Image: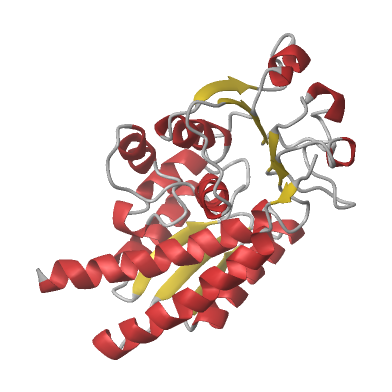
Amino acid sequence: MRDIILDGKRLAREIEEELAIRVKRLKEKTGETPILATILVGDDPASATYVRMKGNACERVGMESLRIALPYETNTEELLRKIDELNAHPRVKGILLQHPVPHHIDERACFDRISLEKDVDGVTSLGFGKLALGGKAFGAATPTGIMRLLEHYGIDVSGKRAVVVGRSPILGKPMAMMLLNAHATVTICHSRTKDLPDIIKEADIVVGAVGKPEFIRGKWIKNGAIVIDAGYHPGGKGDIELSAVIGRTLAYTPVPGGVGPMTIATLISQTVEAAEREVERKES
C-alpha cells in the first residue's frame, strides 16, 4: 500500500509565500504592519521555543511580532489587564496566549478575555460555540491546520468514521467538531476510554491528540486508515506508533514535519485574515 505523506512543512512554506503577498498588500493599503501579540507567562523552555518559532514566522511573511514575557508570579487579574491592553491596541490584529499558563492562573478566563476579532488561535468559548453552530470565527490553530492539510491533499472525510483520541478544548474537542462539520462520523476517546483498541480498529481516520508518546499502538490501526498525529515528544515521537503503520496507511502525517508546521502557518494566516477583515469593516 502506498502511503500519502501529508507534508505539513512543505505546505506551510507555500502558505507563507502567499501570506507575504497579502501582508504586502495590507501595508500598501493601510500604511501599517499587522502585529501578532504573543504572551508567555513563566519560563517554560518548550513554550518559549514555540513563541519564538511563531515570531520567526511573522518575520518571514513581513508581519511584526510583539512578544510579551510575564513572570511566573503573574496572577489572573494582571494577565487580564494585559489582554485588555492588547484588545485595545489598534495595530495588534491577533493575540496568542501561550498554553499552558501557570496553574494558579485561571486560563479559561484569560482565553475568554481575548476579543473574538483577535482570537486568531481559536481559544475562546464564544469562537468555539460559533464554529460548532456554523457561525464565523477563527478555529483552533492545530485542528484548522489539520483540516487544511487534508483538503490540500484531496482527502475527503465525508462519510468516513473518525476517531479522535484526546479531548482538550484547544485540540481534541475542536478537531472532532471540525470533522463532524465536514460530514465525518466522529467518536471522541481519551486515555480512560474502555476498549480503546477495538474502537480505533474501526476508524477510517485516527487523530492522535492525547499528549502521551506513542500511546496509540500501530496494531490498533487498520490497513488503509488516514493517520493524523498531533503529538510531539522528546526523541521525535508523536502520540501514535507511526513506525508500525507506515507502509499500510492511505495517508499519514510525519512527526516532525506534519501537523506542527501547519499549526504555526494557520496562526499566522488567521492573523492576516483578521487584519483583512478589519480593513473590510472600515470600508463598508
User: Left or right of 29: which side holds 14?
Assistant: right
Task: Name which quarter of the figure residue 190 lies in.
Answer: top right
Question: In the figure, is residue 51 to the left or right of 181?
Answer: right
Q: Quadrant of the C terminus?
A: bottom left
Question: Which residue reaches farthest front?
Answer: 1
Residue in the foreground of this view, choosing between 8 and 96: 8
Identify the residue at image location x=47%, y=81%: 20
Looking at the picture, tell me which residue is in the foreground, 193 or 228.
228
Left or right: residue 155 versus residue 216 is: left
Query: Is 182 or 79 nearer to us in this picture?
Result: 182
Q: Residue at x 39, y 86 (%)?
A: 24
Q: Position of residue 19 (x, y in %)?
A: 46, 75
Task: From this view, report whether residue 246 is shown above or below residue 118.
Answer: above
Image position of 48 with respect to 25: above or below: above
Residue 105 x/y as whole percent: 54, 44
Can residue 132 be seen in this snapshot? yes
- Residue 131 on image: x %, y %: 35, 39
Residue lying at 63% horizontally and 47% vertically, measured from the top left: 102
Q: So how many labels did they put on this image?
A: 0
Task: Identify the image's colour scheme: rainbow, by chain, secondary structure or one colour.
Answer: secondary structure
Residue 67 visible in the shown view: no
Residue 107 lies left or right of residue 135; in this view the side is right
Task: Please say if 252 is above or below 61.
Answer: above
Q: Is residue 185 above or below residue 40?
A: above
Image quadrant containing the N terminus: top right
Give residue 205's position: percent from left, percent from top: 63, 31
The furthest residue to the top: 194
